[in-house]
Image (cartoon, rainbow, N blue to C red):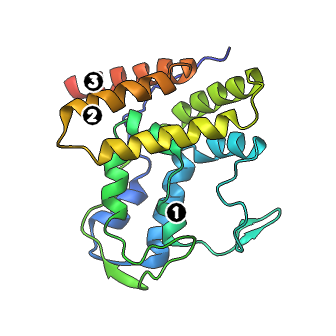
Amino acid sequence: MPSFNSNDQSQPISQSIYESTSRITNMSRQTVIKIGVDALNEVGSDLICKVCILNGGSCCSGCRHLVDGIGCANRNTSCTAWLCGFLKYLLYATRLLKEWDDFWRQVPGQDFREDFTPEVFFVEKPLQMNRIRNLSEALATDLRELASEQIAIGFILTLREKIDKNIDRLNHCKNDPKKQIKIERELQVLSSRFHNFQKALRDYHLNRIEGENK
């Protein structure tokens, strides 16, 4: 079983992402898409996507903009902002989901697999993420192991949807502590076999605490 090192996980993804959103208020649609794509690449979304694709669960399946061997031929703000259950869990567990959601909430005109986002619009809050690619690697390893152990067809995809649904429910009951606790317990059960990820996550939070105390 591989080990995962989470050193330097409290550092920002890249200075360019901070700078591109912290010093300007008018932002172009293409700049926002680039910020989102760069952030997803840095946090390791591709590692998780590969597992889902191998298990028949590409989120882009059936999209008219998908080109074999190339990928998306027409990126938009909607698909860039959207997270599957596993990516949502990754950001939830690292306490970065609110950061992601708050940034994309500023972007108007999002729709399903297309957008009506203006070419230039006002952005006040920057996107500030951390380097967590090693956590994505750990989660992808757990998902591959789970997929290989399961006889049931579609197990990984069902797990993805259950996690997605529960995180959405959690966001909708912020004023109900009892319901929040119940949903958080359900998420703990759903993620209980993410052993590599949980180890990397503990190291990640420990490193952040140590960094804050320096």
Residue at image position (55%, 22%) is 194
What's the distance in space between the residues labelled 2 and 3, CA to CA?
A: 25 Å
Left or right: 5, with 97 as reference point: right
In the displayed structure, 133 sits above or below 75; it is above
Place of residue 65 in the rendered image (x, y in percent of width and height, measured from the top left): 70, 73
Which numbered disc flags the more N-terminal residue, 2 or 3?
A: 2
What's the distance in space between the residues labelled 3 and 1, CA to CA?
A: 30 Å
Binning the other alpha carbons within 10 Å of mark 3 as few (below 14), some (14 to 19) or many (20 upward) gives: few
Q: Are marks 2 and 3 in contact (CB under 8 Å)?
A: no
Residue at image position (76%, 46%) is 56
Residue 214 visible at all: no
Q: Secondary structure at mark 1?
A: helix
Kind of residue indicated by mark 3: Ile
Which numbered disc flags the more N-terminal residue, 2 or 1?
A: 1
Q: Secondary structure at mark 2?
A: helix
Residue indicated by mark 1: 80
Place of residue 101 in the rendered image (x, y in percent of width and height, measured from the top left): 35, 55
Residue 64 visible at all: yes
Badge nearest the viewer, 2 or 3: 2
Q: Quadrant of residue 166?
A: top left
Extreme-right residue of the structure: 69
Badge nearest the viewer, 2 or 1: 2
Q: Secondary structure at mark 3?
A: helix
Q: Looking at the rendering, in which quadrant would you find the N terminus?
A: top right
Residue indicated by mark 3: 209
In the displayed structure, 122 sits above or below 163; it is below
Residue indicated by mark 2: 180
In the displayed structure, 11 sits above or below 68; it is above
Kind of residue indicated by mark 1: Thr
Extreme-top residue of the structure: 1
Binning the other alpha carbons within 10 Å of mark 2 as few (below 14), some (14 to 19) or many (20 upward) gives: some
